Image (cartoon, grey):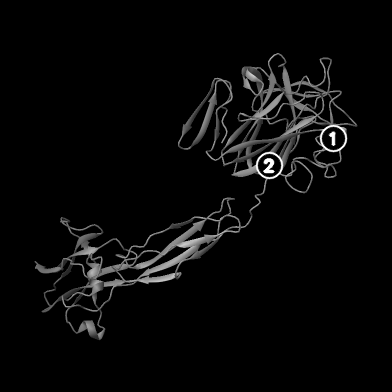
Amino acid sequence: MYILSSMQRYVGFRLRSGLFSCGVFLLCTHWGRGAEVTYMGSETGLPENNYSVQNWSNPDVAKAWNVSTSEVYGSSGYYQIRPTLSSFPTNLSGEAAAAGNNLGATAPTNPTLLSPPSFLSSVTGGAGNFVNGSGYNTYRGPDGISLYRQGALSVPVNNGPYNSPAGANAGYFGIAMSFRLKSATNFRIGIAVDSVGASHHGPGIYSPNYVSIEGVFSDPLTRDGNADMVFFDISGAAGDLFTVALWQNVGTQSVAALSLVTFDIKQPSDMTPPDITLNGSDSVTVPWGGSYTDEGATATDDVDSVVTVIPSGAVNTSKPGVYTITFDATDAAGNAATKGFRTVTVSAPSSTTGADGLSDLMRYALGGNAPGDSVAKPSSSVAGEYLVITAIVRTDNPNKLTVVGEAVTDLDNYANGTPVEIVPGEEAADQGGVPGGSKRMTFSVAIEESVTKMFLRLKASLDQ
């Protein structure tokens, strides 16, 4: 984790959601707790390395900081700022660029050549001027073949003085660009500077002494007119914002030019996810009201010696049904295992009537959580012209449990298939003393004058 701790007067503070840094000179930057910026090194385009910086896109030229075997920079995206074909050069001098510009992507002449990385949600340039003039370095285009006179975004280096690797209050900086991540990514960024050639002030006058990203500095650069490219590895989360600053030492500060930015996703060396193995069976049955302790699972990985398995889900043995315990594991490289699953079935209560006249199923319907639980038995009464049963009924399993009244005029009707009148329950006005997950309900049926006998009973059914 890196913060702009090396800069004087820079204010940082922590919040639970991430790391925020706000400076008196800089837009507020948010990057998550897991974000990391690491300076990797620099490369200078010289005859002995076949001008590797200028040949950034040419696979025939070896690259010191390439992340794969392709020998190119920018395999995941690039911004080649305002180049002009070497065969038909067009000068740019002082074309103003406001803060938050698109790095010349939509310029009417000599537009920036770009392939925006898919993992970025935004890329903006700092306030300055787009430039491209005589004596600027020649660069390859993104096709690896075409030759361009390389342009740049030139930004004032006038924020400071602040601490830098050169010492206390030894440097000034200018903001060259900012970019925000759309998704969590581990990538390498290359930043090309010192590409605008010599001037009457001397070579490298418009180059930085250092490049920094979020307070992480490069090594000192030569500022000699030979193109330099500095490389940082960044690991961040979606929404993280990073800012690139160009620094010059006190006494030499003026403007500094950014010419090329490349992005290369770094694939983790560990590409294999862990394997999850369940302890015990993947399908378990538990009696209603019993106890259940999951046996868990283990994970093995081809790189990491220890991988933690995280279970999720719960089993409620007081409520019959089918439950799923899910097991997840992720190795240190971020490879997620194929989930493991265990199915736990809490069996339905028995419908056999016990000595107290209640079956386990009816005991469950009346609010019991286990076969031995004591429940309030229903009461029956005649209220005027109605036959009524009042009962405390379980209501916390409406998708599985159904409790209704059944009314007939002859008890034999229950056995011979004669239609039975279904009597839905209604919530009683008095709910005092009712346990959680249940309600006091009344089931009432009108007694017709022509009927000499009327029978009303409760019926409970449970889907499994």
Would residue 328 be found to the left or right of residue 162 on screen?
A: left
* Label 2 crowd bin: few (<14), some (14–19), many (20+), radius 10 Å: many
- Quadrant (top left/top right/bottom left/bottom right) for the C terminus: bottom left
What residue sits right under mark 2 in the picture? 117
Q: Amino acid at mark 2?
A: Pro
The spot of residue 15 in percent (x, y) is 46, 34
Would residue 97 be found to the left or right of residue 402 on screen?
A: right
Cα–Cα gap, marks 2 and 1: 25 Å
Residue at the image position 82 percent from the left and 34 percent from the top: 54
Q: Please, which residue is most extreme toward the right here?
A: 87
Residue at the image position 15 percent from the left and 75 percent from the top: 356
The spot of residue 71 in percent (x, y) is 79, 45
- What is the quadrant of residue 79 in the picture? top right
Vertical relation: 146 (above or below) 255? below
Vertical relation: 387 (above or below) 96? below
The spot of residue 391 in percent (x, y) is 18, 65
- Compare residues 391 and 377 and report the one nearer the observer: 377
Disc 2 or 1, which lies upstream in sequence? 1
Would residue 223 be found to the left or right of residue 13 on screen?
A: right
Q: Please, which residue is most extreme toward the bottom here?
A: 416
Vertical relation: 175 (above or below) 408? above
User: Can I make out residue 385 in this image?
Assistant: no
Badge 2 marks a residue whose secondary structure is loop
Q: Amino acid at mark 1?
A: Tyr
What residue sits right under mark 1 in the picture? 51
